[in-house]
Amino acid sequence: MLRKHHHRGKSQLSQPTQCLLTTISIFLYLCLSYLIFTDCFFGITFSDLKYRLGLSDFSLTAYNSPFSIHFIDVGHGDSILVRCGENTALIDTGKASLGNATRKYLQRCEVKRINLLIVTHTDSDHIGDFSSIADYFPIDNVFLSQYNIRSSSEQTETERMMYAKIKEHHIKVIETGINNYSLGDVVFQILSPGRDYQNKNDNSLVVRILYKNTSFLLMADAGQGAENDLINSGKTITSDVLKVSHHGSKTATSQAFINKVAPKTAIVSVGNEEKSLPDSAVMQRLKRSVDTVLTTLEDGNIIISSDGTQLQTFTDPKSKVASFQPKGTDIGKQSASIPRT
Ligand SMILES: [Zn+2]
């Protein structure tokens, strides 16, 4: 009986059915392979599929949004990714010593090309990861602050590294002061420096980014002199989001400036390497005047997406720099020893 039953079970799948199942399996396998290798199948990309299945990670949170700005947690430093359709801009790269956090983040975001890399100024906490990014991603244009250009004998080691990579990869350099540039639907207004402040931080490129009716003011490390000039310039500096200057240092972000910008959200890009940052008086001023104040120190990577009118903010405390550590690859000893409190 047993043998007979076993025999009948086996024969339940007739040969044509088996054939059909095999054909369907091969078809699905080929579809999946095609999707993985070409990243597009009947208009569905692999990223889209991952997103729809809830498998995408935080960096793809804004995947379906037409515009997103990502304040990448690079510890003490700045690195800000802007994505709009096919276009990608990066404002600063953070430093290299934190395990190439920016490069890895861009990889996670499946960035293929950087159309515009704005170097606000050339301190290592802003361009330290330039080398690894330029080696990994094609970069079309680099913006440099016209008042921060030094002759080769005056350049720092970090600046020499940057110029060497610019030359090696034949990247177009635009030395700029106040000007407007557009990349697809995004406008980059360079609002400062309008004069030479004789100081690298104050000569930072201050960028106001416009996407339709939404605006983002990125202050780099510009100090109060540049802030006052902006207040008195008569230009519109009101913005929905303010990237606070100089990692929340007391060198900037006066009450008058906060009032003039009137942001709904303020972001401080800061690590815990320098205990005096962010300055407590600056944080108090911000918290008194701004609805939402976020720091990369507390909130990890921060993404704000825009549909041209409405903003949505996403934070990912789990992504804090500490979580990038250490998997034993190219993570510097320096970063591994940084305590997180
Ligand atoms: Zn800085």
Image (tube, grey):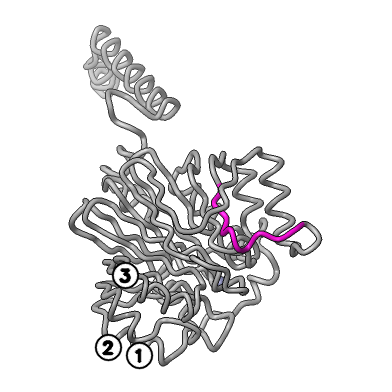
Q: Secondary structure at mark 3?
A: loop
Which span is picked out in magenta?
Answer: 142-151
Residue type at mark 2? Arg
Name the residue nearer the viewer: 187 or 43: 187
Neighbour class for label 3 at 10 Å: few (<14), some, many (≥20)? few
Do the numbered discs 2 and 1 sit on residues whose CB atoms are within 8 Å? yes
Q: Secondary structure at mark 1?
A: helix
Which residue occupies 54% across, 88% down? 276
Which residue occupies 72% across, 55% down? 161
Q: Is residue 62 left or right of residue 133?
A: left
Q: Is residue 22 above or below residue 122?
A: above
Residue 1: percent from the left, percent from the top? 23, 22
Tag 1 residue? 284
Q: Is residue 95 magenta?
A: no
Tag 2 residue? 288
Q: Of marks 2 and 3, which one's residue comes earlier in the chain? A: 3
Residue type at mark 1? Gln
Tag 3 residue? 234
Pair 2/3: label in front: 3
Q: Residue furthest left?
A: 309
Q: Is residue 91 above or below residue 170?
A: below
**Mark 2 → mark 1, Cα distance in angstroms:** 6 Å
Q: Quadrant of ligand 1?
A: bottom right
Disc ID at residue 110? none
Pair 3/1: label in front: 3
